[in-house]
Image (tube, rainbow, N blue to C red):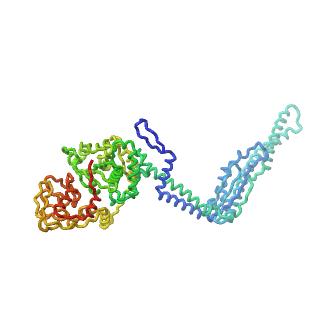
């Protein structure tokens, strides 16, 4: 790989493939079509097998003939034989029907003479006056007999044609000679005994006639003495001792070689007309950005945040991506990142955003994830998060629902934690994304110790990502190369750059496959998600209490005083299991304590107006509907976090309940107290 700098000094380097790397990448892409290559090899082997079978019982007998031209002086060097002999014409004459009829008569061939020519092949070696007669049949003796018969028929036909031509010429010369000889004889009789000046003219005519007679007689004599031999057989056909075929081994070898070439050709044609991005090079060239990492195929039931981050290869891949981003000068300055997929599901993009946040948190950075998915928000339900409070700025108008409503803290285990602003359904998505509150969230990355990651819906599905690209330092594209075309990636890059953004890189993945197998599979997945929750012993029944006073609107329920033995609180029988097992919602409804029945280790409370029981919230004037989850008594869900952990401990002391020390340690191990900077 070489780096070519752009025309401006501030432009980032563009990666360009060297020609050897490009060729190697193309060859590797050809190997992505094993079926086509295997099909070509199979066709080649079948062709080789057919060649071996069809030539295994074929025998070829060969006879060679040197042709000559009839001439008066064959040793005359001034005569060029190759100029007087047309070998192509002779080849056509050797395979003519006339020759086949002569050979059929010699062989007593019962069929059509044209069928006799089907096994004959006549060739002319370069720069020679040799005709090679090759005859192929399944019988070696028959091949030799037919080859010799065809040679004999050809030579006989050629001799006959030459003789006919000579005889015709002799007859013509004799026809010219006869009248001249008669005229000469008549003139000789008239001049017999005559002398004087008058006879001199007749003697001159007689001399001319005699010269003409002599010339014609000489030509006739030469034609009669002409050697009309058509040629000479220099090799007589003999029965072959072995078949003419290449053999099974050579036939299969040739077929396999041709099949490989054919398979590679078909794979190359398929690659040329394949619009999908099949390799990292295709993705990098289409987006003009490097591929930062490649994720293996996962199950759709796997948690977004990778578990066992200390020993997980997947977590190491996310760390590698995070480190490459951290050292990118375009991102390292303000550390604002937008994560989006081109099309399809955003689940893998959400997993990339969450795990990058955990990786950045491991380095000591404070990370904030903003879920800009306002149509189908899902991060809150898939992460172990607790609410810590509202941002400091006040909401105004349409934007007070999102993003200024809530902020959660996500527990990432050994990696620490990070903040999450969960998505929520709003009436006007565009106004919420461009609101001042959203700008303030992104501007938190102005602190060098803060990293902001924005998760958006797929770019081709909604324009939400394009509304935010100018507020971040770069875009991280998460795509499955098999599900997106190269032209779509190029269009994605044009959309991002046209909106004022920059593509920092790409994370490739191989998609997700279903990991659910009916109710049992879902149950198993739920149990796996809750594997980190500690086992807490049920709380002991609390001391008797008297009904507490109703709580103030929107406030907490009043606590009951000590009294006679009362019924255990709603958490006495369930402990913390209903609240934190698997970080999921309980299957049944969470019972609400009756007024005054709030004793027990679970810390039951009298139900005043707007009081919080379990994790759900009643319809008090100050409560946000749907903000809490059933069973989320711990940690507390109050806006200021006053329920956790001090309020619960004070309430346990007030009601005389005693918690198991192991339970207290387990709860602190899951959600340690966090201090906000």
Describe residue 447's horizontal placement relative to residue 123 as left or right: left
Quarter where residue 157 is shown: bottom right
Total labels: the figure holds 0
Whether residue 77 is visible to the viewer of this picture, yes or no, is: yes
Whether residue 145 is visible to the viewer of this picture, yes or no, is: no
Residue 272: horizontal and vertical position, in percent?
46, 50
Residue 487: horizontal and vertical position, in percent?
39, 47
Q: Is residue 209 above or below residue 95?
A: above
Describe residue 53's horizontal placement relative to residue 446 as left or right: right
Describe residue 72's horizontal placement relative to residue 545 as left or right: right
Residue 652: horizontal and vertical position, in percent?
19, 61
Residue 312: horizontal and vertical position, in percent?
39, 58
Of residue 444 and residue 259, the one placed in the foreground of this image is: 444
Residue beneath the point at 31% across and 62% down: 532
Of residue 298 and residue 565, the one placed in the foreground of this image is: 565
Q: Is residue 657 above or below residue 361?
A: below
Describe residue 530's horizontal placement relative to residue 20 as left or right: left
Of residue 301 and residue 73, the one placed in the foreground of this image is: 301
């Amino acid at each position: 790989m070489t780096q070519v700098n752009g025309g401006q000094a501030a432009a980032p380097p563009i990666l360009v493939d060297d020609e050897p790397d490009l060729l190697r990448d193309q060859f590797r892409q050809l190997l992505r079509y094993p079926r086509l290559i295997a099909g070509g090899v199979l066709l080649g082997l079948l062709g080789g097998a057919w060649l071996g079978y069809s030539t295994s019982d074929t025998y070829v007998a060969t006879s060679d003939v040197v042709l000559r031209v009839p001439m008066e002086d064959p040793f005359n060097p001034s005569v060029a034989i190759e100029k007087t002999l047309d070998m192509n014409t002779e080849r056509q004459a050797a395979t003519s029907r006339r020759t086949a009829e002569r050979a059929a008569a010699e062989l007593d061939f019962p069929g059509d003479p044209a069928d006799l020519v089907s096994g004959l092949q006549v060739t002319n070696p370069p720069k020679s006056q040799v005709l090679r007669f090759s005859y192929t049949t399944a019988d070696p003796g028959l091949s030799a007999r037919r080859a010799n018969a065809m040679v004999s028929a050809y030579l006989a036909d050629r001799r006959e044609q030459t003789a006919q031509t000579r005889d015709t010429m002799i007859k013509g010369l004799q026809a010219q000679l006869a009248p001249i000889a008669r005229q000469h004889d008549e003139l000789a009789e008239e001049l017999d005994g005559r002398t004087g000046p008058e006879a001199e003219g007749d003697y001159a005519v007689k001399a001319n006639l005699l010269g003409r007679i002599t010339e014609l007689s000489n030509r006739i004599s030469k034609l009669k003495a002409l050697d009309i031999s058509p040629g000479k057989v220099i090799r007589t056909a003999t029965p072959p001792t072995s078949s003419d075929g290449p053999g099974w081994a050579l036939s299969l070898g040739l077929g396999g070689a041709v099949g490989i070439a054919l398979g590679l050709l078909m794979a190359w044609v398929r690659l040329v007309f394949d619009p999908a991005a099949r390799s990292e090079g295709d993705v990098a060239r289409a987006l003009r950005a490097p591929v930062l990492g490649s994720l293996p195929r996962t199950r759709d039931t796997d948690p977004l945040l990778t578990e066992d981050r200390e020993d997980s290869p997947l977590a190491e891949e996310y760390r590698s991506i995070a480190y490459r981003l951290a050292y990118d000068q375009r991102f390292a300055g303000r550390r604002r990142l937008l994560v989006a997929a081109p099309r399809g599901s955003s689940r893998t993009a959400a997993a990339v955003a969450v795990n990058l946040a955990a990786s950045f948190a491991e380095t000591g950075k404070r990370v904030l994830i903003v879920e800009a998915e306002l149509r189908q928000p899902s991060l809150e339900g898939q992460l172990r998060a607790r609410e810590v409070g509202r941002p400091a700025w006040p909401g105004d108008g349409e934007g007070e629902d999102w993003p200024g409503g809530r902020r959660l803290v996500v527990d990432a285990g050994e990696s620490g934690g990070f903040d999450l602003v969960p998505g929520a359904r709003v009436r006007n998505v565009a106004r919420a994304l461009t609101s001042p509150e959203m700008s303030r969230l992104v501007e938190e990355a102005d602190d060098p110790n803060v990293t902001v990651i924005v998760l958006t819906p797929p770019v081709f599905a909604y324009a939400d990502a394009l509304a935010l690209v100018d507020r971040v330092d770069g875009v991280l594209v998460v795509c499955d190369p098999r599900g997106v075309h190269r032209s779509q990636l190029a269009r994605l890059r044009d959309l991002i750059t046209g909106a004022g953004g920059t593509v920092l890189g790409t994370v490739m993945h191989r998609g997700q496959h279903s990991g659910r197998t009916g109710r049992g599979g879902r149950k198993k997945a739920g149990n796996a998600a809750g594997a980190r929750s500690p086992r807490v012993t049920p709380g002991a029944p609390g001391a008797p209490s008297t009904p507490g006073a109703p709580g103030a609107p929107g406030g907490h329920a009043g606590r009951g005083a000590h009294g006679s033995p009362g019924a255990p609180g709603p958490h006495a029988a369930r402990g913390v299991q209903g609240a934190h097992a698997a970080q999921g919602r309980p299957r049944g409804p969470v019972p609400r304590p009756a007024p005054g029945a709030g004793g027990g280790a679970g810390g039951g409370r009298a139900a005043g107006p707007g009081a919080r029981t379990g994790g759900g919230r009643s319809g008090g004037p100050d409560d946000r509907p749907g903000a809490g989850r059933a069973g989320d008594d711990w940690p507390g869900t109050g806006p200021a976090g006053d329920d956790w952990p001090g309020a619960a401990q004070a309430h346990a002391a007030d009601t005389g309940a005693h918690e198991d020390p192991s339970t207290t340690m387990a709860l602190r191990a899951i959600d340690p107290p966090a201090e906000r900077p």
